[in-house]
Image: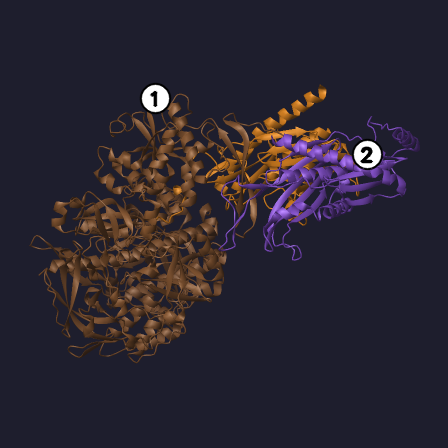
């Protein structure tokens, strides 16, 4: 009836309408209508007289890619099609592939809607390279309407063809536009349309510099395979077929299948488990065996089916490592000792709690990442005579299966750590297929191993970019701005001091305590005001948000914010004026009752930056009567009262092994010798801790009261009784009853579980308790129902909790600072923080990074233990305690090294296992070993390179007391 | 490796919006005057896919109380049952009542009501297709219908919406942009010659720091809209003359 | 729909004219005024049409949903009607002012479409799931009430002609309903059997169709028929006050089927020319 007039001349057609039908989540079918505008002012990305000037930074050159490819020596630009982007991103990403590329917006949209994680990676690549994004979907010359009967793939391809035709026409003959596709049938179609088109394989093969690239190419599944061959092959399928998504979804709806994240057992790669909610209860379902796991890789989202109750079994008591894998004569087939499973000891199974088991019926979402590892070494003779390009890649992560890769660089890669990605896992292949991504460095090199550690834990560890550094002030010229001084409370004359571990450079908290008379004390906790430097939405803020936490490794610290801030401008150093965010309480001196709480932005000048030991000394020495010392004494007394209150409420004291420190000493000899020093706990440690807890709780209460929808809090859910099964059983065998009903009774029964003969028993029980519980998590209060129960911090026995006290090293604290600053009316709230969805998104990233950081720290300790043993150059004899008894191994805790060693039984027939009493009997000598028993072990390094896993140094464990003879000789000595 | 961060930095920065417009561009606008025979004044406005019909009856006798000083303005806004993808029920729609009241206030201020004491002017708005910025389209449609009815009005009242997505202000929000989570929307209705704002309605929470930019975007939009509206009026008069 | 008040003299003039087959706007008794039909104007509807004839304007919009069928009719789809008179037509209709007319109109539609053959092709899974078409009739302007029925029936038929339903596929394993990715994989409806309404108005001693407001003001009464394309009468009703003699009605019947078939042809021609 009415045709429209475009308002702007560059919108060439008014209001085109695209409509389609959609099924909503509720199952209703609706018609969706979208209006779109085509235009003639879309830039082509080149220096061009007809196109409008591009406002984006990417500029393509007319001399791009000249002389680099044999197929097309002249200058050309390449456009990868959507399949290439989907499969060959590693090739595109690598530097030898060339810098300049055109990406079509329609392809990008397709990837965004089908594979979000790939899309994000692609955007990362785009940031690094000179990739021009062509908005072909809005260009009037390149946009085409979808035709009847056309599939989505065909349509996207036709859009690409239309765009390339236009491009070629637009830029003239001097520069060729080349379409890269993944398979030859698509190439044929494109060539028929008159385009210059190559498959990616062809293109890479003809590049002058292609050795590395060839390895990265994902080869398409064999195209030539005929139908009858396929049938023939069907007989060789090793795995059941995955169910289609529709059936899975229906099954999940009906309660037949469950959706869950698959987790492979760290100690046994042929066993995995998932956590599901069955009949309203959280249940862990065991999935064991290759066939039941059905090609699920760790972290995949899978659909599982529960096995009938008769088939349920107890948790596998085997510890399997790749070391046990023996090599089959046939090069292609690897066999694992599956018989182990069948040899199950029937006797011991009775009476042991049965766990539900299940099998994977389909994969809902793959969560494959890139894996670090090594190439499995092959027999040198074979390599000499024939050219073999098919190799096995052994990942470092024990939960990941071996990956079959193609490489021509075997000789140079065999001594390297490399990065590999999984491409696919067909039914007829025992192992997944993948391709080489890049080499990381020589095996055993400390820098390489450290990088692997960071890569494996997905820790952003690159140097801060220039744009981040530009957000920082010059530390030499910086002082607190006068307008800040006037706004902030002035605490510069108060006797404030900080207490931290020795060598600490990022001091984020300081304390003071003054006697106000009338039996009341004023206590102040002063936290570095990082938010004064890190302003919302700056590159600095975004980088910090991404990192979310500082990661502490044994010999390295990966900062969340640049050192200028963390160790200088934000750090509350002695005698420097610093901006802080303070919590000030009025406390009853006798009862430590909080009478009044205040929050304020402030400035302080720390009188002393003490270590725990120094603070302890000051408290203990009778002569010191200065303000700071007296304050410390008061604080110490108050802290003890606070702690008692907390313990009375049911707070758990959960131990981990005392932290240890590796100190490198430059010795006379050329090699660095590492010494181990364990950190000592002082009274003052817990003094600081108590006040930090109090500050965190006070802030949490305030936030929840003022902004109940937006508060960023931390909770630690109460674990279900079933989680404690292992703990209860272990203690029962030693005659201790553990009451897991609530925190208070748990704390009490843990205190009771002591053995005068075994000082580490209580510690070990507490360690096991920690492992039984879930981790504390950050969340946004507006996104969590039932605050009464769900806000609980079980471990600290407080109904509400957050993190406020370490903004230098935790992003969560920074957010809490911003929220609190808004609450006390100091600053306007950053728009991002006004939505609970956005806060929740932040929380999820922080939780993830936090978890990864913990894993990385642990891995770092392990790595350094290994290096330590190596540096000592002789086997270590250590006192240890049996932490767990397994069917084929003992897990032994070595307190001095804070290390858990695994002792494998050499021959299973010599050992008799009893799961009920947690004991194992060595039949040859009639020695019975019980959980928690003290043992003496010898630790030595074995270079496993002689076996098929090259370059893996493993800590070998031998039992000395009681002595179990071994046939294996340690080599490194 | 999978990165879990979902900050703005990972979203594709492109100069174009979801429907191919640049941030400051208004959708195509079509206006018509005198689309009904029986009403005293009527108009049709099509802003992108949003379609509005407006009619004006009056000034006529009041049906109830009358005001000896001025004319009573009665605005009624309605979204048709088929205006959106899913069929909607008409009754008890608080939002419609609110918009009706807003419109009443806008035109009470704009029309020279003191010229018609003891009378009433009815303005009816029927949104037959809703694709975002309904309120702005209604103000424009009502304004044209009043002009078509020959009722004295201070100026051509024009309106446009603006929002704030991905840290930039955008003009004339469509339904997809409206429904994306947390998009703030500001609609400004104004008397363009005197730069007087008659209506300023926002929802979704705009940070005060950004308000200026968003307001500017809306006002710029008003100017583009006004251009088309004026042209429509002139063409209509020309047609009447011929 | 401003009230039209006629003096006796005016009425007399008008009635006499009609008796001689001359109407005041120059038409003969069985002439219709020009009809302006448009389809596919509401993108968010699966089908839509607008019809205008001088001072009458109606929009019809079709929405779809999947519903379980009535237990007694497992293989039949559903069509529901809603009508509404916009205040645009007259301030009188503000709020619920038009309810009286609307209720009559909707019930006449429902009765006429009760056993329409169209319902049979709306089945998705017999006994489980059928299409339900919700047809909204929005009356923007009213001339005479009698001609409103005729025009509404044309608008609805045209909107149904315009209707495109997605072809749905039922997954045999899960019984889930899936929609094809191809936006062109759609189903059109066969509208040939759909009835049109013909209203004949008795003025003086003659019957006329499509009365103006003035004519309606001088009429005795009207008769409303719903007729399908085979000339079958589906439903009928007498409108308004007054009484009618039986004999002339019998003479009327053949004439009505001629008028109805003309209308059917008109719609089909118009729709075809509009889509091409």
Residue wearing tag 1: A173
The spot of residue A420 in percent (x, y) is 26, 48
In the rendered structure, the answer to whether residue A584 lies left or right of residue C162 reads left
Question: In the image shown, does A763 or A210 lie closer to the viewer?
Answer: A210
Local secondary structure at mark 2:
loop
The spot of residue B53 in percent (x, y) is 67, 35
In the rendered structure, the answer to whether residue A542 lies left or right of residue A951 reads right
Residue A268 figure quarter = bottom left
Colour chain C is painted in: purple
Is A839 above or below relative to A257? above
In the rendered structure, the answer to whether residue A874 lies left or right of residue A718 reads left
Question: In the image shown, does A832 or A567 lie closer to the viewer?
Answer: A832
The spot of residue C186 in percent (x, y) is 56, 41
- Give the chain coloured brown: A
Colour chain B is painted in: orange
**Residue A432 visible within the image:** yes
Question: In the image shown, does C231 or C203 lie closer to the viewer?
Answer: C231
Is A433 above or below relative to C270? below
The spot of residue C144 in percent (x, y) is 80, 36
Residue A805 figure quarter = bottom left
| Residue in the picture at 65% in, 39% down | C159
Residue extending farthest left: A668
The tag on residue C211 is 2
């Amino acid at each position: 009836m009415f045709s429209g007039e475009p308002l702007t001349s560059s919108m060439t057609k008014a209001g085109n309408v695209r409509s389609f039908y959609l099924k909503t989540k509720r199952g209703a079918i609706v018609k969706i209508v979208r209006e779109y505008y085509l235009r003639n002012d879309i830039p082509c990305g080149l220096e061009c007289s007809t196109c409008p000037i591009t406002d984006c930074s990417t500029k393509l050159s007319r001399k791009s890619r000249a002389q680099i490819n044999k197929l097309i020596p002249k200058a050309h630009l390449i456009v990868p099609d959507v399949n290439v982007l989907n499969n060959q991103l590693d090739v595109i990403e690598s530097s030898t592939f060339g810098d300049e590329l055109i990406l079509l917006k329609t392809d990008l949209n397709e990837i965004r809607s089908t594979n979000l994680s790939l899309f994000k990676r692609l955007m990362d690549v785009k940031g690094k390279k000179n990739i021009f994004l062509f908005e072909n979907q809005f260009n009037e010359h390149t946009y085409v309407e979808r035709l009847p009967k056309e599939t989505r793939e065909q349509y996207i391809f036709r859009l690409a063809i239309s765009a390339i035709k236009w491009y070629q026409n637009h830029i003239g003959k001097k520069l060729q536009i080349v379409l890269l596709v993944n398979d030859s049938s698509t190439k044929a179609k494109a060539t028929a349309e008159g385009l210059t088109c190559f498959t990616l394989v062809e293109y890479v093969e003809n590049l002058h510099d292609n050795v590395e690239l060839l390895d990265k190419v994902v080869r398409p599944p064999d195209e030539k395979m005929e139908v009858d061959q396929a049938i023939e092959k069907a007989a060789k399928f090793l795995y059941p077929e995955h169910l289609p998504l529709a059936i899975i979804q229906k099954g999940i709806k009906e309660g037949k299948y469950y959706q869950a994240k698959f987790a492979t057992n760290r100690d046994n790669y042929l066993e995995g488990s998932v956590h599901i909610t069955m009949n309203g209860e959280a249940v862990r379902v065991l999935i064991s065996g290759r066939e039941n796991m059905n090609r699920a890789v760790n972290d995949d989202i899978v659909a599982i089916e529960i096995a009938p109750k008769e088939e349920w079994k107890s948790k596998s008591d085997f510890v399997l490592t790749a070391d046990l894998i023996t090599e089959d004569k046939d090069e292609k087939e690897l066999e694992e000792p599956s018989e182990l499973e069948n040899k199950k000891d029937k006797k011991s199974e009775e009476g042991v709690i049965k766990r539900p088991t299940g099998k994977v019926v389909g994969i809902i979402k793959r969560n494959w990442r890139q894996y670090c590892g090594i190439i499995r070494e092959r027999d040198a003779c074979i390599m000499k005579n024939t050219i073999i390009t098919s190799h096995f890649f052994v990942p470092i992560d024990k939960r990941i299966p071996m990956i079959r890769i193609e490489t021509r660089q075997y000789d140079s890669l065999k001594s390297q750590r490399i990065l590999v990605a999984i491409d696919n896992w067909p039914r007829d292949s025992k192992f997944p297929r993948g391709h080489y991504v890049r080499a990381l460095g020589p095996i055993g090199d400390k820098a390489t191993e450290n990088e692997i550690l960071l890569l494996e834990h997905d820790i952003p560890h690159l140097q801060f970019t220039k744009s981040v550094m530009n957000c920082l002030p010059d530390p030499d010229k910086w002082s607190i701005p006068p307008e800040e001084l006037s706004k902030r409370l002035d605490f510069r004359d108060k006797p404030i001091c900080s207490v931290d571990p020795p060598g600490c450079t990022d001091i984020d908290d300081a304390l003071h305590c003054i006697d106000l008379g009338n039996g009341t004390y004023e206590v102040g906790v002063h936290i570095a005001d990082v938010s004064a430097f890190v302003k919302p939405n700056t590159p600095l803020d975004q980088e910090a948000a991404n990192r979310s936490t500082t990661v502490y490794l044994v010999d390295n610290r990966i900062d969340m914010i640049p050192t200028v801030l963390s160790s200088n401008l934000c750090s509350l150093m002695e005698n420097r004026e610093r901006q802080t965010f303070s919590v000030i309480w009025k406390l009853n001196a006798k009862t430590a009752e909080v009478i009044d709480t205040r929050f304020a932005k402030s400035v302080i000048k720390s009188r002393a930056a003490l270590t725990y030991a120094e603070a302890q000394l000051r408290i203990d020495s009778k002569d010191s009567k200065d303000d700071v010392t007296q304050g410390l004494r008061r604080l110490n007394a108050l802290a003890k009262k606070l702690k008692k209150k907390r313990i009375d409420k049911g707070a758990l004291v959960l131990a981990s092994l005392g932290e240890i420190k590796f100190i490198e000493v430059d010795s006379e000899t050329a090699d660095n010798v590492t010494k181990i020093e364990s950190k000592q706990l002082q009274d003052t440690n817990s003094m600081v801790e108590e006040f930090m807890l109090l500050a965190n709780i006070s802030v949490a209460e305030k936030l929840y009261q003022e902004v109940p929808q937006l508060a960023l809090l931390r909770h630690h859910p109460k674990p279900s009784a079933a989680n404690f099964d292992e703990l209860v059983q272990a203690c029962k065998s030693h005659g201790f009853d553990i009451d897991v009903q609530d925190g208070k009774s748990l704390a009490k029964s843990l205190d009771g579980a002591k053995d005068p003969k075994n000082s580490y028993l209580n510690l070990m029980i507490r360690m096991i308790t920690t492992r039984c519980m879930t981790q504390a998590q950050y969340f946004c209060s507006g996104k969590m129902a039932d605050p009464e129960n769900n806000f609980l911090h079980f471990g600290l026995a407080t109904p509400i909790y957050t993190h406020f006290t370490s903004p230098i090293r935790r992003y969560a604290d920074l957010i809490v600072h911003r929220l609190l600053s808004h609450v006390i009316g100091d600053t306007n709230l950053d728009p991002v923080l006004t939505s609970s969805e956005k806060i929740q998104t932040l929380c999820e990233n922080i939780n993830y990074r936090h978890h990864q950081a913990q894993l990385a720290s642990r891995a770092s300790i392990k790595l350094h233990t290994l290096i330590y043993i190596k540096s000592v150059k002789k086997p270590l004899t250590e006192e240890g305690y049996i932490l767990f008894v397994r069917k084929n191994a003992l897990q032994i805790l070595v307190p001095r090294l804070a290390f858990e060693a695994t002792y494998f039984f050499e021959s299973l027939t010599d050992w008799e296992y009893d799961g009920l009493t947690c004991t194992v009997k060595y039949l040859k000598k009639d020695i019975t070993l019980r959980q928690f028993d003290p043992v003496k072990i010898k630790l030595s390094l074995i270079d496993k390179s002689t076996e098929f896993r090259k370059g893996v140094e493993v800590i070998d464990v031998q039992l000395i007391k009681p002595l179990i003879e071994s046939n294996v000789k340690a080599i490194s000595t | 490796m999978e990165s879990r961060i979902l900050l703005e930095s990972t979203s594709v920065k492109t100069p174009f919006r979801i429907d191919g417009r640049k941030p400051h561009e208004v959708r195509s606008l079509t206006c018509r005057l005198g689309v009904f025979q029986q009403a005293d004044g009527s108009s049709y406005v099509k802003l992108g896919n949003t379609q509005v019909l407006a009619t004006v009856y009056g000034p006529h006798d009041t049906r109830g109380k009358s005001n000896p000083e001025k004319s009573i303005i009665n605005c009624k806004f309605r979204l048709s049952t088929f205006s959106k993808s899913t069929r909607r029920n008409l009754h008890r729609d608080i939002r419609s009542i609110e918009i009706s009241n807003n419109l009443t206030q806008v035109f009470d201020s704009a029309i020279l009501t003191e010229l018609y004491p003891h009378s009433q002017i009815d303005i009816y708005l029927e949104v037959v297709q809703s694709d975002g910025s309904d309120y702005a389209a209604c103000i424009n449609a009502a304004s044209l219908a009043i002009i078509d009815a020959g009722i004295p009005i201070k100026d051509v009242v024009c309106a446009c919406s603006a929002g704030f997505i991905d840290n930039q202000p955008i003009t004339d929000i469509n339904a997809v942009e409206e429904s994306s989570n947390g998009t703030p929307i500001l609609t400004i209705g104004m008397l363009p010659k005197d730069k007087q704002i008659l209506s300023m309605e926002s929802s979704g929470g705009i940070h005060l720091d950004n308000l200026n930019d968003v307001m500017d975007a809306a006002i710029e939009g008003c100017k583009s809209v006004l251009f088309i509206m004026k042209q429509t009026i002139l063409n209509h008069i020309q047609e009447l003359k011929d | 729909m401003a009230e039209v008040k006629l003096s006796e003299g005016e009425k007399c003039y008008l009635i006499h004219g009609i008796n001689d087959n001359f109407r005041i706007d120059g038409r003969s008794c069985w002439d219709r005024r020009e009809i302006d039909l448009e389809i596919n104007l509401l993108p968010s509807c699966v089908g839509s049409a607008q019809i205008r004839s001088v001072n009458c304007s109606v929009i019809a919009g079709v929405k779809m949903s999947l519903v379980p069928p009535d237990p007694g009719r497992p293989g039949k789809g559903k069509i529901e009607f809603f009508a509404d008179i916009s205040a645009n037509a007259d301030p009188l209709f503000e709020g619920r002012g038009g309810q009286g007319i609307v209720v009559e109109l909707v019930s006449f539609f429902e009765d006429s479409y009760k056993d329409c053959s169209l319902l049979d092709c709306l089945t998705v899974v017999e006994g489980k799931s059928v299409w339900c078409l919700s047809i909204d009739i929005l009356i923007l302007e009213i001339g005479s009430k009698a001609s409103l029925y005729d025009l509404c029936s044309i608008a609805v038929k045209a909107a149904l002609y315009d209707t495109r339903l997605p072809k749905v596929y039922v997954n045999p394993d899960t019984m889930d309903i899936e929609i094809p990715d191809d936006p062109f994989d759609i189903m059109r409806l066969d509208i040939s059997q759909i009835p049109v309404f013909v209203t004949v108005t008795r003025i003086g001693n003659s019957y006329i169709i499509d009365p103006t407001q003035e004519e309606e003001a001088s009429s005795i009464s009207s008769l409303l028929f719903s007729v399908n394309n085979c000339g079958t009468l589906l439903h009928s009703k007498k409108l308004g006050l007054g009484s009618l003699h039986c004999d002339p009605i019998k003479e009327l019947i053949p004439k009505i089927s001629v008028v109805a078939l003309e209308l059917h042809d008109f719609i089909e021609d118009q729709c075809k020319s509009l889509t091409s």
